[in-house]
Image: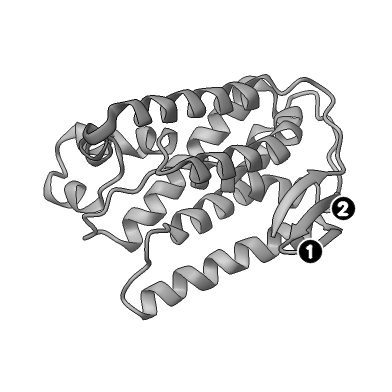
Amino acid sequence: MIPLRDSTPSRHFPVITVLLILINLYIFYQEVMLGPALDSALSVFGLVPARIEKYPYDIFSYLPFLSSMFLHGSWMHVIGNMWTLWLFGDNVEDQMGKGRFLLFYLICGVIAALAHYLVNPGSNVPVVGASGAVAGIMGAYFIMFRQARVLTFIPPFFLITIPAWVFLGFWALSQLYSGTAGLLTDGGGQIAFWAHVGGFAGGMVLFKLFLRDDKESYQL
């Protein structure tokens, strides 16, 4: 399912959402420019759980908990994440304000990375992507705007409008199912499903701590 538009208009221009999108696109452009050196860069700045296990007292082993969320593996990867951030981020930013929204985004990304690390402590595969942080935004939206509706394209021919809680709930359950299946088969492929689950859960649990002081209402 591909989300195309949500029904909730934003009250303010989403400055931080747009800034995050531009930063991620710029960094991915720089990744492309690295050419053959990209693999080395991803191994340094991507999250490699086994490296933390091997060097637990090296502070630089923990840098990828932040840096990895600004790296992506392909154009489709970065475009998919940034499109989702654009659709749901503006409304969440509305409710939190710029500074709190940015902090919330980063914290959700770290929680997502931590969830992946805890489930896959021995993995040598670098994990990159904003998916976990974006999942945190989706988790917050799932609670705050569950009466909203999402125009959704279901390939190859179907275009439907469904409640946001259905769309986001189905997405979260699919990540949980895929993550569990990966554990049962002793493998998770190239997708860090537990990072998505961790980010989504973190967003659901923590969003109230970041709401604006003026208590702008959200939909129940």
Q: Regarding mark 1 in the picture, which secondary structure is present there?
A: loop
Of the two numbered discs 1 and 2 on the same chain, state the one appearing first in sequence.
Answer: 2
- Of the pair 153 and 68, the residue shown nearer to us: 153
User: Based on the displayed image, in which of its 4 quarters is residue 68 positioned?
Assistant: top left
Q: Nearer the viewer, residue 58 or 4?
A: 4
How far from the left and from the top, in percent, is residue 143? 74, 51
Residue occupying the far bottom of the picture: 184
Question: Mark 2 = which residue?
Answer: 147
Quick check: 213 above or below 204? Answer: above
Q: Which mark, residue 157? A: 1
Residue 155 screen position, x and y as percent: 71, 63
Instruction: Report whether 23 appears left or right of 86.
Output: left
**Residue at x 68%, y 45% (from the top left corner):** 140
Q: Quick check: 141 left or right of 128?
A: right
Labelled disc at residue 78: none
Question: Which corner quadrant of the image does residue 72 belong to?
Answer: top left
x 76%, y 46%: residue: 4
Structural distance between the alpha carbons of marks 1 and 2: 25 Å
Residue 48 on image: x %, y %: 25, 48
Label 2 residue SS: loop
Q: Foreground residue, 160 or 116?
A: 160
For the N terminus, which image quadrant?
bottom right
Q: Is residue 108 left or right of residue 191?
A: right
Residue 25: image location, x then y, percent = 50, 28
The amino acid on which the numbered mark 1 sits, given as a three-letter code, is: Phe
In the displayed structure, would residue 213 be above or below residue 130? above
Q: Nearer the viewer, mark 1 or mark 2?
A: 1
Q: As rendered, which of 26 and 117 lies closer to the eye?
A: 26
Q: Residues within 10 Å of mark 2 (few under 14, many from 20)?
A: some
Identity of the residue drawn at 15% across and 36% down: 58
Residue in the image at 68% along x and 66% along y:
170
